[in-house]
């Protein structure tokens, strides 16, 4: 158990819909990262937050957005869903901002878009 | 660039030693991470190399050559439970994002 929690574990929805994925980092960790893992793309970085502020953006679509709240939990919002958005979405957390910190991954949310 | 290359699949037998290689463009990263991921589960941290050389941690060791853009993960005394995907990831920059390779699926046979 990494100490990172994600809900829900599974999500099945239809094209065009909007969903929200939730992540609680390990106690004390200020950085939260979101990754998408699909069969054909591997693990892709989406976005990073540090202490409530967006710090880095990766291959995140405009239909996707995220935020980190004062209690440090984070939400990833996916809208106008397409079949290709079906993937495992992982949240990870680390203690610091820099890239030499080990990242601890949550169990993931498996999103299926029908 | 951040291209990270590693073999797609490897197989080995129980008790053997296997080396999983990873190459990357040298301008991309300050350090190299290795993660293990069982099917459908979260990646778990194995090692982080920021200096050249070999880091040993039990049955697992990781090597880095920054000038050559090359790393490997060495797994000794293989066990069935080592069957998993091994992900090489570039990182160590001022921001925490990791650039992952596609992963090497290791199958350990009895």
Image (tube, rainbow, N blue to C red):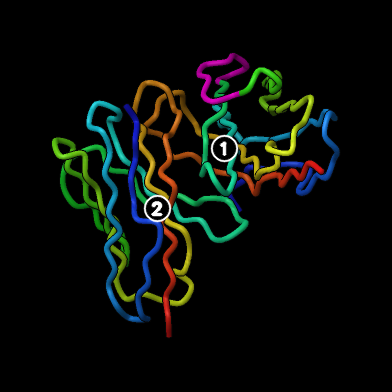
- Helix, strand or loop under label 2: strand
Numbered badge on residue B38:
none
Magenta residues? Answer: A50-60
Looking at this view, is A98 or B6 the one in front? B6
Q: Quadrant of the N terminus of chain B?
A: top left
Indicate whether residue B86 is drawn in magenta: no
| Left or right for B65, reference A9 | left
Instruction: Quadrant for the C terminus of chain B, please.
Output: bottom left
The residue nearer to you, when weighing A22 against B89, is B89
Q: Quadrant of residue B92?
A: top left
Query: Chain letter of disc 1?
Result: A
Query: What residue do we see at 42% from left, 22% from top?
Result: B95
Q: Please report the residue visible at 76 percent of the width from the left and 48 percent of the height from the top.
A: A9
Q: Nearer the viewer, residue A67 or B27?
A: B27
Q: Position of residue B74 (x, y in %)?
A: 27, 62
Q: Which residue is mark 1?
A: A92
Picture coordinates of residue A88, whole percent (x, y)? 65, 45
- A30 shown above or below B83: above
Taking the spot 57% from the left edge, 28% from the top edge, the residue there is A46
Which residue extends farthest top? Answer: A53
Residue at mark 2 to residue at mark 1: CA–CA distance: 15 Å
Question: Residue B32 location, x and y as percent?
Answer: 31, 40
Query: Residue B46: which disc?
Result: 2
């Amino acid at each position: 158990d990494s100490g990172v929690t994600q809900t829900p574990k599974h999500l099945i929805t239809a094209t065009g819909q909007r969903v929200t994925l939730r992540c609680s980092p390990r106690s004390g960790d200020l950085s939260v990262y979101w990754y998408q893992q699909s069969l054909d793309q591997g693990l892709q970085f989406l976005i990073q937050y540090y202490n409530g502020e967006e710090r880095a953006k990766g291959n995140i679509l405009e239909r996707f957005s995220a935020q980190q709240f004062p209690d440090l939990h984070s939400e990833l919002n996916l809208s106008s869903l397409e079949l290709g958005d079906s993937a495992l979405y992982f949240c990870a957390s680390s203690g610091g901002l820099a890239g030499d910190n080990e990242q601890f991954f949550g169990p993931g949310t498996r999103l299926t878009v029908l | 660039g951040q291209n990270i290359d590693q073999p797609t699949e490897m197989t080995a037998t129980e008790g053997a030693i296997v080396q999983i290689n990873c190459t990357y463009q040298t301008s991309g990263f300050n350090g190299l991470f290795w993660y293990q991921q069982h099917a459908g589960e979260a990646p778990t941290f194995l090692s982080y190399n920021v200096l050249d050389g070999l880091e040993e941690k039990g049955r697992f060791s990781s090597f880095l050559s920054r000038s050559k853009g090359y790393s490997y993960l060495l797994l000794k005394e293989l066990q069935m439970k080592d069957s998993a995907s091994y992900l090489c990831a570039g990182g160590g920059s001022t921001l925490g994002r990791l650039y992952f390779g596609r992963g090497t699926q290791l199958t350990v046979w009895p």
